Image (tube, coloured by chain):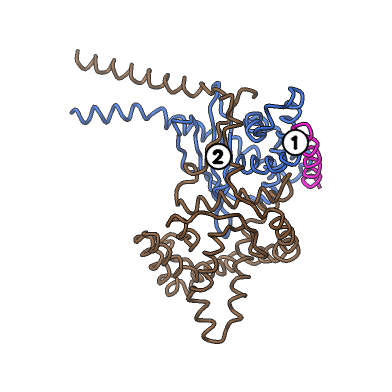
């Protein structure tokens, strides 16, 4: 009887974790489907398709937090205006990166598989398997809950974190401008313009 | 009465536990220094960066001119042919995969890889069909670089090898060990069919590249520093392969704040 009570107690304690994982999974599926819809609609001009994706990403990614993390040590010395400009540019950069990754999308099926709740860091990790005729690729979404809604804080493709890669990449470029975020913004504008022209053409 | 008390107690526990976690999930505080404590970008030791960047530039051109078009052409083949070629190449790797699993003390995995090799080489018609997967014998990758890492050998510095791409001192040593010990290559050499070795390497490169066309293009088209992006991706991918653990657990988890959203 004592064992049964202990088990029941453990199940009760664990229930909220599962509830959060499933809730996060359902939320994520809705948002992924919005992006996929943009690619399934062939009549949509490329500019509009990108705008739809950018809007979905801006609404659902912790863009500002990721931007700050990626900026590393250059963040502290920058003025408020420079930081705001950088955040705006970074959000567009993030959307361009994800839109570019999706460009090869051709009606592949996907399945949201395992979802785990990392209690220590308050993060849900949701595995998504994308199937093609010759195999599959695993994408892991890291989702954090704040103020009763979810935000994507990272995306891992084949064990490679988008956020960690961006931080490393930005740091390498920031070194060349002495970690001056204002000068870096100019480089980010140029890169975004280039990426955008490739996306829409 | 007792049952009623137990029921009430259970309700209270459920209520407390939900609120406890709900409260915790909203408590997404920004650490003021979450953007300066991490050293992810400093972990990669790259003293030959100048030379590496030059080789990387050459590889990038070679990729655009030769490998990517070849991979795109390969993608146009009917998928059973692509799968067959991929399975055949992967099957030839299995003897060394099993050896490396054994060297890393993974007896069960080594047995599975050996079983995979025999099942796919026979029932799977020389490895063209991956029937072993249906028997629960999963494909796993292990190489000498991973074995050396398991034995405690450090990365060494970062190197970009001409045509072979990103590597480091340990993984380059591992790659040379693979070239020297591969039984299929040795057999081909002994039979006077040495031409099959570069053909196998090239086929493997095209097969692997065909699986990441979009990812590579996205990285190349959207990176402010493509070299640094590839370097970081290489290290993350290798770290995951060496640890053989879940990617979620392995990759350092940035403390992303949400206060601006």
Q: Which residue is mark 2?
A: A141
Q: Position of residue B126 (x, y in %)?
A: 48, 75
Q: Position of residue A112 (x, y in %)?
A: 51, 42
Q: Nearer the viewer, residue B254 or A113?
A: B254
The hue used for chain A is: blue
In this view, the residue farthest toward the front is B47
Residue positioned 43% across, 23% down in the render: B21
What residue range appears in magenta? A180-201
> Could you give the CA–CA distance between mark 2 and mark 1, rounded to whole angstroms?
22 Å
In the rendered image, which quarter contains the N terminus of chain A?
top left
Task: State the image quarter where residue A178 is shown.
Answer: top right
The hue used for chain B is: brown
Q: Nearer the viewer, residue B176 or B91?
A: B176
Q: Which residue is mark 1?
A: A51
Q: Position of residue A53 (x, y in %)?
A: 70, 37
Foreground mark, 2 or 1, reads 2
Sequence-first disc among 2 and 1: 1
């Amino acid at each position: 009887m004592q064992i049964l009570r202990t088990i029941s107690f453990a199940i009760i304690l664990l229930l909220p974790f599962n509830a959060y994982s499933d809730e996060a999974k359902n939320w994520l599926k809705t948002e992924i489907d919005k992006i996929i819809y943009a690619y399934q609609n062939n009549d949509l001009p490329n500019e509009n398709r990108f705008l739809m994706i950018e809007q979905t990403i801006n609404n659902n990614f912790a863009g500002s937090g990721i931007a700050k993390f990626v900026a590393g040590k250059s963040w502290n010395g920058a003025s408020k205006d420079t930081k705001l400009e950088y955040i705006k540019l970074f959000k567009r950069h993030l959307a361009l990166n994800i839109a570019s990754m999706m460009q090869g999308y051709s009606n592949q099926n996907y399945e949201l598989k395992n979802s785990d709740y990392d209690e220590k860091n308050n993060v849900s990790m949701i595995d998504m398997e994308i199937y093609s005729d010759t195999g599959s690729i695993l994408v892991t979404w890291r989702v954090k809950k704040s103020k009763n809604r979810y935000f994507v804080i990272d995306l891992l493709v084949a064990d490679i974190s988008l956020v960690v890669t961006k931080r490393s990449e930005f740091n390498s470029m920031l070194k060349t401008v002495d970690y001056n975020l204002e000068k870096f913004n100019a480089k980010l504008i140029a890169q975004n313009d280039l990426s955008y022209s490739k996306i829409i053409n | 009465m007792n049952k009623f008390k137990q029921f009430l107690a259970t309700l209270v526990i459920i209520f407390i536990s939900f609120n406890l976690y709900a409260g915790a999930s909203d408590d997404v505080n920004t650490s003021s220094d979450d953007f300066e404590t991490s050293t992810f970008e400093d972990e990669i030791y790259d003293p030959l960066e100048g030379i590496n960047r030059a080789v990387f530039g050459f590889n990038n051109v070679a990729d655009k001119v030769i490998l990517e078009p070849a991979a795109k052409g390969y993608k146009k083949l009917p998928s059973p042919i692509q799968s067959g070629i991929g399975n055949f190449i992967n099957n030839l790797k299995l003897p060394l995969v099993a050896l490396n699993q054994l060297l890393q003390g993974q007896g069960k995995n080594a047995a599975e890889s050996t079983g995979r090799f025999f099942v796919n080489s026979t029932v799977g018609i020389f490895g063209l069909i991956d029937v072993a997967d249906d028997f629960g014998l999963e494909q796993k990758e292990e190489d000498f670089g991973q074995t050396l890492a398991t034995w405690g050998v450090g990365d060494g510095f970062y190197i970009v090898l001409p045509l072979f791409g990103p590597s480091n001192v340990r993984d380059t040593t591992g790659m040379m060990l693979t070239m020297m010990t591969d039984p299929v290559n040795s057999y081909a050499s002994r039979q006077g069919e040495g031409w099959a070795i570069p053909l196998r390497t090239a086929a493997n490169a095209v097969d692997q590249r065909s699986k990441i066309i979009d990812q590579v293009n996205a990285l190349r088209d959207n990176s402010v520093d493509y070299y640094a992006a590839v370097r970081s991706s290489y290290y993350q991918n290798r770290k995951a392969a060496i640890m053989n653990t879940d990617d979620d657990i392995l990759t350092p988890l940035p403390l992303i704040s949400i206060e601006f959203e």
